[in-house]
Amino acid sequence: MPIPSPFHSRTSKLCTSLRWKDWAGYHAVCSYRTCHEPEYFAFRHAAGLIDVTPLFKYEVYGPDAAALLARITVRDITKLGVGRVTYLCWCDDDGKVVDDGTVSRLEEDYFRVTAAEPSLSWFERMARGYQVTIEDSTQRWGALALQGPNSRDILKQVSDADMDGLGFFRVVRAQLDGVEAFISRTGYTGDLGYEIWVDTSAGSPGSAGSGTAAERVYDALTEAGRNFGLLPAGLDAMDVTRIEAGFIMNGVDYFSAHHCLTEMRKSSPYELGLGWTVKLDRGPFVGQAALAREKRAGSARLFVGLDVAWTDLERVFAGYGLPPEISSAAWRDGRPVYDRDGRWIGQATSGAWSPVLKKNLALAQLEASFATPGERVEIELTAEYRRHRVTATVVKPPFFNPPRKRA
Amino acid sequence: MNPAQRSGRYDAVVIGGGHNGLVCAAYLAKAGRKVLVLERRHVLGGAAVTEELHPGFHFSVCSYVVSLFRPSIIRDLDLAKHGMEIIPLETAFAPRIDDCGLCRWSDPGRTRHEISRFSARDAEIYPEFSLTMTKMAQLVRNIIDSPAPDPTSWNPAELFRLLRLGKELQRGGAESVGMNLKLLTMSAVDFLDRWFESEVLKAVMSVSGIIGTFLGVRSPGTAYVLLHHYMGEIDGAFRSWGYSKGGTGGISLACARAAESFGAEIRTGAGVERVRIKNGRATGIVLANGDEIEAKTVISSCDPRLTFFGLVGRDHLDGDFVEQIERYKLRGSSGKVNLAVDRLPRFHGREGTDFLRGDIAIAPSIDYLERAYDQAKYGEFSERPYLNVVIPSIMDPSVAPPGQHVISMFVQYAPYDIKEGPENWPSKRQAFGDTVVDTLAEYCPGLKESILYRQVLTPWDLEQEFGLSEGNIFQGELSLEQLLFQRPAAGWARYRTPIKNLWMCGSGTHPGGGLMGAPGQLAALSMLGSRQT
Ligand SMILES: Cc1cc2nc3c(=O)[nH]c(=O)nc-3n(C[C@H](O)[C@H](O)[C@H](O)COP(=O)(O)OP(=O)(O)OC[C@H]3O[C@@H](n4cnc5c(N)ncnc54)[C@H](O)[C@@H]3O)c2cc1C
């Protein structure tokens, strides 16, 4: 049975649609209103506030913390500066991805790792012989993502941190309405945005205001957001933004090597477009040899973005006398991709109509020879219960990458 | 080719930096042409412009919502990358003085609830009506995405296009053809009477039939305009209206940036005095400051009257054509009042801001609207006009300081031809502004005290400042007799003009006015197809 997050007292009041789903054992809002689109537009044009507490979190402390993380992930974490965050993945010995997430270096010997799946036992198994302590802090940290062009202005109202000084993928300690928290400039929307981490075990701070630490942070952000177009947002809206941003999702666009019954289902970082996170030339790390081999020999499949031709959609639907039917929600039931001769060359794993770009987008893994931007392929489309193939052009993600994200 | 390689004479000079001129320029530049855009005002955008008229308040001075902007243009010109952002409206609110009015929501269930307070029957029929309108809008959509067919041509391609249009009308089924023909000739009210019984709903729906025309909701032909607006399309899928982030000018600026990215040159503060014509051919333009600019092609985005009588001159045109342009109806009937306020207006019986995330129509009854029209017929502005109000700062706080708001009010009727004569509009401007504010204040007491700044635009101002003849917001009425192959004149609906190398690309050409970019796009594609530039 899913459990409530520390923000549940607030989110449950706002969620008039009663649209919830299970996310890693927590109640999570799909959309606050019957239709998620306003929440999507809030992310892109103003700001959206989404409860991301269900992310798995681990605190890694100790003199060997950096060395351990460098050993178990594909990045050389020893080089990560204090106050910086990095995105990466970790692999098994065969160089197949186990999970992806972020690592923040909060102090010299103190890191926080986020993950999509429970990872404690894997980390602990790897940690034998290292001087580290690993704490599963998933329940301890309430987490909110505040994303969108107005997110910085909102945080300026409620936090004592220097928001203008907080660069892309940086993290600081801050007080929000008197509550201790971490603010990181990270997120899953590919826009200007922040994540706020509140320690729910610290108890209610001081006398000012009412409610728990988490509730106070939520209230303060909501109040400050009033003049900045802030809306509470759910997973449906975020799903569209993450596809525009070209971000993959564990369990949707790939499967953790730990859960795959066949080799075919597993993916390497190169096959997922995460090659840029892999640093091969350094001390040993898990999967290094296999990854070096793949790098040399080339990958069989590669991760790409697809831009599905609008005119083809129109044509298919016009054949039934219909205007093009486009779901406003993202899809994640995989779809086969073919070459121009109808031969299967891979799969699109998720996709969405992008209201900002007016394009029909998909994330896909294709045979390497088709992964060049500009390449034309065909993707399956079901219209009126019948299968069709429509043209799609290979593009390099992200599809949407506004300058404000890093500015 | 980069601009440096294309030195020398311009391939094309576009007169007017409204969104259509800019779209046209972008397409031409993208195809490698050397293009120059000349805008008379100090800012780009024409009727699609944002101006900071009071510190911190960014007004969508004229046009305030977008719906028909062609998604294909957004894709072709990569407008999202160049800063185009559209925020869909979520509600349509019709306040009433004595109760909480009627709000239609993007959530159909909630809308049904609201309408059933007035008529349970209407609440059920409403989705059926929407379905039928969608069906018909689909036909119209095909029409606006291609140049108007030319019925006088013996060119097989043209005949084929006409046949295809006929086929499209037929494919909607006999019933829908019937509907379509009826639509062409009926009044908005007659048309709605066939569907609905509640006055509140009919009144607020009928106003789409009169926007930008000098017609009343009971005038024949207004049902068609209703459809034109109903089509409000975002995404290529049929959706609703939206704001451009930062104000409507954002759309024009995105088009301008796209044009520049392809190498087009754009100048503001560069009014064109006339088109230079030699032996029936346009050879360039003369600027107001006397400078001459040579070009292989000249493209005017100004309305047909300004283009032919202002920039070309009757002498260069034959009598029949002059007569057609003289007959072209401009008859402006609307004005605009923009407010900066220090707090949100409050409406009777409604809390919060949910119901304000869209437009607000002051159209309490059909008789109210008809009375408003009656006054206009006799050369007065309506004492109680129809208002279409939006408060974009609720969803897009970037247009006003925190906690403060901009209110945009589109006002009808304000006839260009007042009985004192249009040139006397300036002396009535403030009285007109007062009337508009008084009208809205009846629904939201306290409005007047919240006003920090007020801008009043009469049809005279629209003409003088924005170059819209007779203040017509669409560069010519969207009535049937001047649409399709008759816009702006029979035989000249394909962006060419009787002057060789002079083309048109503004709202005065097919498919007409509104923020859609289609005239600019289709004109450019026609020109490129004709290999003249
Ligand atoms: C008050 C008002 C409200 C409206 N509301 C809406 C709305 O909400 N939604 C919608 O879709 N549509 C609306 N419209 C209609 C829409 O704005 C217009 O149809 C559209 O903007 C016209 O674009 P255009 O590029 O064809 O012409 P214009 O925008 O008229 O551009 C022509 C340009 O030419 C310039 N110019 C004129 N003379 C010269 C010269 N001699 N030399 C150089 N430049 C010159 C003008 O300054 C102008 O910039 C509204 C219009 C008005 C006036």
Image (cartoon, coloured by chain):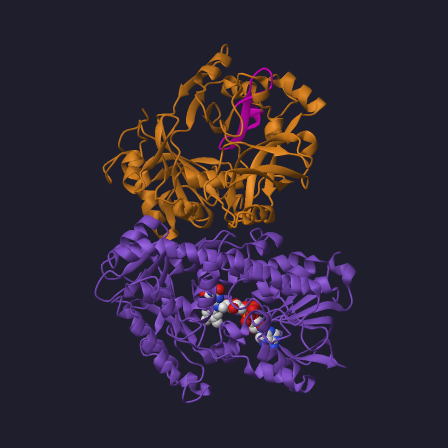
Chain colours: A orange, B purple
The residue at the point 64 percent across, 27 percent down is A301
The location of residue B228, given as percent across then percent down, is 47, 64
Quarter of the image for residue B520 reads bottom right
Q: Position of residue B416 (x, y in %)?
A: 45, 81
In this view, which residue lies farthest toward the front? Answer: B174
Q: Nearer the viewer, residue B268 or B496?
A: B496
**Residue B185 falls left or right of residue B438:** right
Considering every residue shown, the one lying at the far left of the view is: B98
Above-or-below relation of A221 to B34: above
Q: Is residue A248 left or right of residue B163?
A: left
Residue A104 appears in the picture as rendered: yes
Q: Nearer the viewer, residue A33 or A379?
A: A379
> Residue, x 55% and y 52% (percent of image)?
B80
Quarter holding the N terminus of chain A is top left
Magenta-drawn segment? A75-98
Q: Does residue B82 appear in this view?
A: no
Q: In terms of image quadrants, where is residue B530?
A: bottom right
Q: Is residue A89 magenta?
A: yes
Question: What is the tally of numbered marks visible in this picture?
Answer: 0
Q: Residue furthest bottom?
A: B420
- Residue B53 among those drawn in magenta: no
Q: Nearer the viewer, residue B58 or A4?
A: A4
Place of residue A189 in the rendered image (x, y in percent of width and height, measured from the top left): 48, 40
Residue sitting at 77 percent across and 82 percent down?
B279
The x, y position of residue B214, in whole percent, is: 44, 77
